[in-house]
DNA sequence: GGAAATTGCGCAAACGTTTGCTCAATAGAA
DNA sequence: TTCTATTGAGCAAACGTTTGCGCAATTTCC
């Protein structure tokens, strides 16, 4: 029923609890023989330290890293959340830290959930996704001196906290160059409502690559997809595809939107890539299954999540270390949704 | 830095810690005035109880529901894990319970992770996925009297614990009937290595539907996919599709496998559904994006997860309540991967 | 008006760990 | 042989909370 404690080991070996504790933690002056005996007995008795007790003496922290679950909108989450969480789990497990997920109760904000976590010290650190250009969560946690890592940057370039991000700037420039090289001149960018930082970077990367060409025949239309309303989203895409000066190439902020374009193009009997090239971002599972296969950038969510977990663990260990930043270059995955621009 | 404790309140009000504790918990004989004073002071001082201490005395539980992250194998997790976790999160949030995810450290078993969670009371209850016909986790938790809910059943029909499951038996029978009605006679079932209970039910549903027909022309081949080796998995599927008496209809244990069949059929230039009908199970995100769209059963992962969370909360509240069981009927989603059997 | 019951609250132990301090036993040095 | 280091290990306090028990003061009951 009640599990083995350090006391049981002590009794079995006729030692004191202190000695056992030290033998297990490797802190005091303990001869190797004793240490071995203790570790042996611990294994044999199936001893696992009681976290609560460790937390209480202040030795350990809660042993949790927190993640607040937010509704992504834009249709189903697809494989992204799963990849992300499994990556976090692996990165944290290596350090013996567990992951704790807080959902946002009805009527509360993400920030208030975060405040609560910090106040009750339920987690030793937080991982923040969906970072926006001006992010109150970042400001708050910075002010509290609470460890955290963001997946995505905030707008200010001054690095005051740890982040990991995917280089959407370079990627979207690369996508433009690829499509331009294939003869495309009429571009569209399908984007999102919220001012998340990746939107800024990806847009900027595309625009700057365009300007670099200095080709007056190149045009770009930026179309915003509604976040929750799937029907309106489909309509927005159809409007774009049916307009007079229909683009021949559509870049989407991420695969979910790109796949929606594929779907609508199919509905309108537009050939992809014959009439229309489509490129996404993230390489979610569905991107490979779609026909034509979606050309996209693999941002290796699992690895990035794992790495952010490791950053957080490091940060928790050493709160004074200088801010860490990591920009990951996504890999272009060439599938079948892009091709030469249609003649005419 | 260090937060307010019960002691601070006691000192401020010139009371003993016991009185304060009782006033806050409402346990002892405390006059309303005192209680009000204490609660007031607690609010003013920003008191939040130390969870670790509460856990240690065994009064309160951790306020967490635990989920052990397991590697699913069979290729990517796709949208399943994300849907599942977000469902759990919502179900738990309603009850103010947080979700805690434990990864399995290198070299450890899921069971040992579970033991540890139970022993240290890191969670008040557990949610178990991937239930197998004989499941040591279930036996262990039952013996410990630790609250848990399984998503999926164990083999024994006697209900000794709470579970929620999708009715694969009926679904696979339904799938057979659909395909039989379309003229199919040569069937294959693509299954998995491990003795998970859903494998049993789904196979049984298919087999019994077959036997019910009593048609001697009906044949069934059962082919097992390797769990981790994607290349061998592809080979196994190709072998099936290239064999002399190639099946005209393939049922897969779940969508991941069905999509693999679609992919290999494409590679072999077999037309789906012209030459081959394929039906999956779960309706993951990729199923809708695949071309042809995959006919499958929607098991509404999000809702099921949410419901299992609610069951767990109820179980934690009342450990004595009779076992709850819930069998969810999946919805057949007709897409384009099935059709009439090829002539001849 | 005295006994009994009730009320209000404090003492102290307990939960499992960690760790500063202490101390006996042994080893080494002079 | 005596003095000093070193080694091995135990004592006890501390972390913040809950709770059984006890006790004085007050109220209730006959």
Image (cartoon, coloured by chain):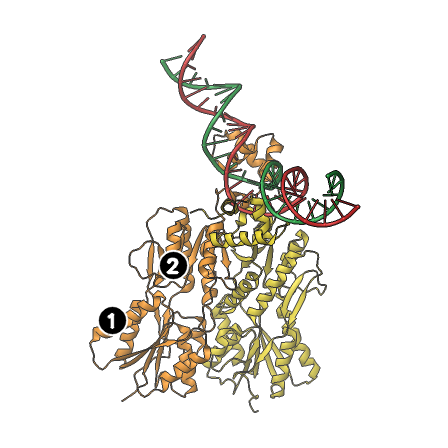
Chain colours: A yellow, B orange, C red, D green
Circle 2 sits on which residue?
B136
Label 1 or label 2, whichever comes before in sequence order: 2
Q: Residue B208 has which mark?
A: 1
Which residue is at a point 47% across and 60% down the rendered structure image?
B68
Number of the front mark, 1 or 2: 2
Residue B100's disc number: none
- Dot 1 falls on a residue whose secondary structure is helix
How many C-alpha atoms fall within 10 Å of the one at disc 2: few (<14), some, or many (≥20)? few
Question: Which chain letter goes with mark 1?
Answer: B
Q: Which of B109 and A297 is in front in this view?
A: B109
> Whole-percent x and y of residue B129?
41, 62
Q: State which quarter of the image contains the C terminus of chain A.
A: bottom right
Say whether residue A247 is visible.
no
| Cβ atoms under marks 1 and 2 closer than 8 Å | no
SS under mark 2: helix
Residue B92, horizontal then vertical, whole percent:
46, 54
Q: Which residue lies furthest to the bottom in this view?
A: A343
Q: Indicate left or right for B187 with D19 as reference.
A: left
């Amino acid at each position: 029923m009640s599990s083995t404690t350090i006391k049981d080991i002590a009794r079995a070996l006729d030692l004191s609890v202190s000695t056992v504790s030290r033998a297990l933690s490797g802190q005091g002056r303990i001869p190797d023989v004793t240490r071995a005996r203790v570790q042996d007995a611990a294994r044999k008795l199936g001893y696992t330290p009681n976290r609560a007790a460790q937390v209480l003496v202040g030795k350990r922290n809660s042993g949790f890293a927190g993640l607040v679950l937010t509704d992504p909108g834009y249709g189903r989450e697809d494989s992204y959340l799963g990849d992300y969480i499994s990556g976090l789990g692996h990165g944290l497990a290596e350090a013996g830290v567990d992951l704790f997920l807080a959902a946002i109760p009805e009527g509360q904000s993400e920030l208030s959930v975060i405040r609560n976590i910090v106040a009750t010290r339920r987690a030793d650190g937080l991982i923040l996704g969906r970072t926006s250009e001006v992010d109150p969560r970042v400001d708050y946690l910075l002010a509290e001196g609470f460890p955290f890592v963001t997946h995505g940057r905030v707008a200010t370039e001054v690095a005051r906290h740890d982040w990991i991000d995917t280089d959407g700037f370079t990627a979207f420039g690369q996508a433009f160059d690829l499509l331009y090289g294939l003869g495309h001149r009429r571009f569209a960018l399908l984007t999102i409502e919220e001012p998340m930082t990746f939107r800024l970077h990806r847009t900027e990367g595309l625009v700057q690559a365009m300007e670099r060409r200095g080709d007056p025949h190149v045009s770009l239309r930026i179309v915003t997809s509604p976040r929750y309303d799937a029907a309106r989203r489909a309509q927005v895409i159809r409007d774009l595809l049916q307009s007079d000066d229909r683009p021949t190439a559509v870049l989407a902020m991420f695969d979910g939107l790109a796949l929606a374009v594929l779907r609508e193009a199919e509905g309108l009997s537009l050939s992809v890539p014959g009439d229309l090239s489509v490129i996404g971002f993230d390489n979610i599972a569905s991107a490979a299954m779609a026909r034509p296969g979606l050309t996209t950038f693999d941002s290796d969510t699992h690895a990035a999540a794992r790495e952010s977990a490791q950053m957080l663990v490091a940060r928790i260990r050493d709160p004074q270390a200088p801010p860490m930043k990591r920009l990951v270059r996504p890999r272009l995955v060439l599938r079948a949704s892009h091709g030469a621009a249609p003649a005419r």
